[in-house]
Amino acid sequence: MTLDVAALELLSHLVEPGSLTAGLIVAALLVNRFAMEHRRQLRRVVLLYGLYLTSWLVAAVARSSPLGALTWIEVTTDLLLAFTVVNLAALLVFDLLLPALAIEVLTIVSDLALGVAYVFAAAVVFSAAHVDVTSVVAASSIAAAVVTLSLQSTLGNVIGGIALQMDGSVQPGDWIQLENGKQGKVTAVRWRHTVVETRDWDTIIVPNASLLSSQIVILGKREGKPVQHRMWVYFHVDYRWAPTLVSRTVQDALRASELPNVSNSPPPDCICMDFARDRRESFGLYAVRYWLTDLAVDDPTSAAVRARVYSALRRGGIELAKPSMMVFHAPADDEDALRTKARREERALQALRRVELFARLTDEECQDLADHLVHAPFTAGETLTHQGAVAHYLYIVVEGRVDVVTQVTPDGPSRVVATIEGPGFIGEMGLMTGESRLASVVAQTDIECYRLDKPGFEKVLQDRPALAAEFSEILARRRVELLTVREGLDAASKSERQLAERDRILDRIRVFFGLED
């Protein structure tokens, strides 16, 4: 008995219809439980199994009849049995076992292994049946030559798929841009084509030969670097503001606090791109350049950047350019100017009167402060002030919420110690005493607020120095509340600390503003 015959008999004894059925049931349960995406492979095994059972029944009937084709029926049955076992083994190994071990195998590699197993199984079956394999190979070679001539483009795609998977130039997970400008994420490199899914929820099927013969761009990919792709956000500002001022205002706002999906290395920046582009002679073209870390959310991230740019320009008193068909500047008459000024002053006065710190000011004093208020809106996520910074102004929050964030040590974790909702105020110690910020303040929502600088507040204190004592009471209470969270003060320590802080702050106010005792 030859080795081929022995192997075939061993396979027939080990894999009878009953045991093969049991193995197929186990494989089906595993696929439905752990790998539902591989049901197509399971259906292929079931189809081969069905053909094998049919051939097995036909062979059983043929044995009891005087037909002369029994040999070829048995060969076909053995061949279908071998193919069924090969496919079942491939399903268990490549689709269940290796993924469970977190071992990734290229699709083409598993297909090649399956093809080699087919050839080996067929050779064993034909040899055991004493079939002249050379004649089969010769006939197959002639058929292969005919198929090759008629399917040149398909074979080109197949060879392209092998090349792509072997050299790894394009891999699943890469974001690419095709020659027609379409962008998408590569989800699979198959024998004939590469599957690309776009942000529009579409799928592009790209023939592998076309992919190899054309120039494509792999977005955000650089050797040894994280995936990030440079994006551009354009806006226009007219010539009343210097390019250096516009660029610095926007760039500082973008770098002050992190934006989701925007890289910090390199950080975002703002540049003046051109003057008078596209027949728009009345304003300059600016651009924000940032590096996108999640290429699937390009438009939402650009929208967040635009919101940050808009708020930064408004805080800086810089207007976006008006359409060229509108009148650029139309002087208003005295009556219109007075009405505009009155509305602006009324909004500022309302903001002051809603804040506890200024509740005891007279109408005249409030009016003096209102004349010095500067409108300063912020977008959600922006940092109004940083812990340790020295800034001689405070913010009056009219609408929105801000988080007070502190770090006990420079390298320690940050934590939110308070949330202030408008109407409220922040940064009072910097304005009153010149001390550095005790905590950072981050906008939780879009906020409307005003900024009050030291020169605007100085006149009120100089005219009525007694206000310093009242302000010190409020400031001491707020400061001790923050220290209580940071240092865990008990009630007795808190009361004692508040008295000491009141006296200390009062002395600092008098020194800072040059008040007499």
Image: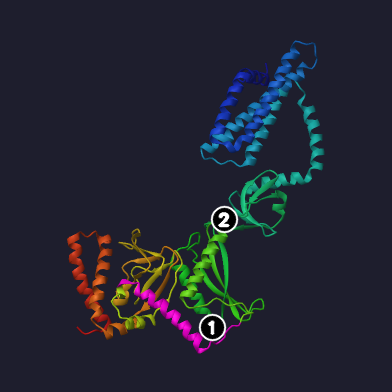
Residue at mark 1: 240
Amino acid bearing label 1: Arg
> Mark 2 or 1 closer to N-term?
1
In the image, is 462 to the left or to the right of 237?
left
- Compared with 397, 172 (above or below) is above
In the image, is 231 to the left or to the right of 131?
left
Residue at mark 2: 296
- Compared with 106, 317 (above or below) is below
Residue 124 visible in the picture? no
Q: Nearer the viewer, mark 2 or mark 1?
A: 1
- Compared with 483, 453 (above or below) is below
Foreground residue, 93 or 255?
255
In the image, is 391 to the left or to the right of 490?
right
Residue name at image x 70 percent, y 19 percent:
56
Q: Quadrant of the C terminus?
A: bottom left
Amino acid bearing label 2: Ala
Please, what secondary structure does the residue beneath circle 1 have?
A: loop
The magenta-colored residue range is 327-356
How many numbered callouts? 2
Residue 349: quadrant of the picture = bottom left
Residue name at image x 26 percent, y 71 percent:
474
Count residues near mark 1 (Cα–Cα under 10 Å), then give few for <14, some for 14-19, many for 20+. Answer: few
- Residue 317 lies, in percent from the top left, at 48, 78
- Residue 106 lies, in percent from the top left, at 61, 42
